[in-house]
Amino acid sequence: MTGYAAENGDTAAGGLPDGGATGSGIGRRRLGGGILALGGALALAPLPLAGAAERGAPGRGPVTADAGASMGSGARRPEHRPTLRRGSAARAGLLQGPLDQLVREAEAYLADSPKHPWYAGAVLLAGRGGTVALHRPIGKAVRYAAYDETTDTGVEFPAEQQIAMAEDTVFDLASISKLFTSVLAVQQIERGALELEATVASYLPDFAGGGKQDITVRQLLTHTSGFRAWIPLHQEPTREGKLRMLWDEVPASAPGSAYLYSDLNLISLQLILEQITGHSLDALLRDEITAPLGMHRTRYNPPASWKPKIAATEDARLPWSGLERGLVWGEVHDENAYSFDGVAGHAGVFSCAWDLAVLARTLLNGGVYGRSRILSEDSVDLLFTDFNTAFLGDEHGLGFELYQHWYMGAMSTPRTAGHTGFTGTSLVLDPSTDTFLIVLGNSVHPVRSWRSGSAPRVATANQLARAVPVRPERGRTAWFSGMASASTATLTLPVLRLASARSRLECALWWDTEPGSDRLVLEVSAGQEWQPVPFTTVGSHPGQHRPDPRPHPQGWVSGWSGRVWHRLEADLSPWRGKGVQLRWRYTTDQLYVGRGAYVDSLRVRDGGVTVFDSDRPRDAGRIAATGWVLSAD
């Protein structure tokens, strides 16, 4: 069984975002002509997206960037739309130290973690803007000839037959293949050949069997169709038999009533695409995506000549595999995709890290790479916009997962998009920082049971997030909470005696945490227990003129704040006449973290007198920091 349906078993339930997390319930931007926001869903009139008419009638073939394709009025992408080149961390606007740590942490999972290696090897690629600042192979692409279940050990090839990972090693992407199918579907929506709110049965009449007549194209793309995760299509020897199983499948829940990730959604979408275009999915992939973008190492069914450059996957045998195949190397790992001759909507695409970086850059550019445009900017917004607002924790654009800390780590924001693959692959795109991360590992080599959880993905994403500097609000340094999990960090001011009814704390605040689970709390003590202090914040969001203050009556913030500095003010008059201490307390749980918190420009005003100012060296020296550090970035 491919991908997320099996992988997501280790996903922790996300906490509720605090009311203080500005933007945690991100509003939808205009998505193009004929689209309206209606509660937790989107209703699309049966019209192509804005500008589709300029791009031509439904059909095949990319439109080049200079062909006058329409840009959505809600677009905020930069004028410069870069193509990729190698460069230094500094050129990418990243910090070298965290990138070095990213590699070290990834290499640690080549060793037992805890009982077996997470992967035999991996290729790591990280970048920002048009600069690939890290492209590093580690470990082995081919190490094991077989798996010995009696001793739970891998049977290694002789050393001279093992193959080291290389920058251009090709991987079975497993469920990352779903992203390509999704992009192909959105292209057809853009061209007017496919309607997002149309029923699947309107394109595939036999699909209505089993009570599936009301399932829509959108529900396939957002995994809200009601399909169960997986069925053994590979057990049917003929294509007709497999389709009959799909036609007869009865939904596990009513369409639109629940989120349940399912390979069957993208298999169904493949059938629609092949029906409306008259072309096979592998041909669509080549003609509509990989050829125009120059992704020459991305395809279904790689030729035998590629095999020495392909990472091996599993020793596939019963009972852990659905088929007796031996070492799978150069052929798709997923049993159902294999039974579809290697071409399936949910799995089967092979690619390398650089090609996936091209795809990432294309989407971060708004659908264009060089002179080739594969999607309009409005269409790209459909990939990065949450359609699953009714299912908190299961945020999803069209095909792309959003805001998933369980593998996106601290790169996770409400518009961070990506996907994982069961073979050990992942792709993460963060539009807020213009960063992208590709981790391609062969984690089912030699057997799927060795890999547990998603720790290398989280670790590498945390380090790339840390590599994006946060400049102090003023001066050279600001106090930084760090990004440690299962920890508490405190930043404590000295005892201050407040005499005025107009006393207040002022400071600059920046936070990005795992929603609900990790909190930044402002507390006060008058010689007794610490208690929270209500405060208000005003964010410096670009394009907002005089934004309204946001109250935090519980005295804490959590979640997403837009990765901008906020001005904070807290009324301290209830402690008039008392000697008080103030502190920031940052707490994290044992699972995932965000980018952390920063505090700068701390001042306590007692009426017209400033009794504490962190910009004054004497006052700054009186701050007691546990876990917090002064940081220039």
Image (cartoon, rainbow, N blue to C red):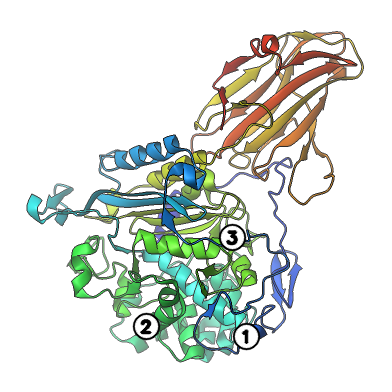
x%, y% of residue 497? Answer: 81, 8
User: Disc 1 designates what residue?
Assistant: 192
Residue 497: give its label: none
Quarter occupied by residue 554: top right
Q: CA distance from mark 1 to mark 3?
A: 29 Å
- Label 1 or label 3, whichever lies nearer to me, is 3
User: Disc 3 designates what residue?
Assistant: 80
Residues packed near mark 2 inside 10 Å, few (<14), some (14 to 19) or many (20 plus): some
Give the amino acid type for the residue marked by disc 1 in the picture.
Answer: Gly
Quarter occupied by residue 21: top right
x%, y% of residue 206? Answer: 50, 90
Please report the residue visible at 24 percent of the width from the left and 53 percent of the height from the top. 165
User: Disc 2 designates what residue?
Assistant: 242
The kind of secondary structure element at disc 2 is helix
Q: Is residue 124 left or right of residue 539?
A: left
Q: CA distance from mark 2 to mark 3?
A: 47 Å
Q: Quadrant of the C terminus?
A: top right
Please report the residue visible at 84 percent of the width from the left and 11 percent of the height from the top. 498
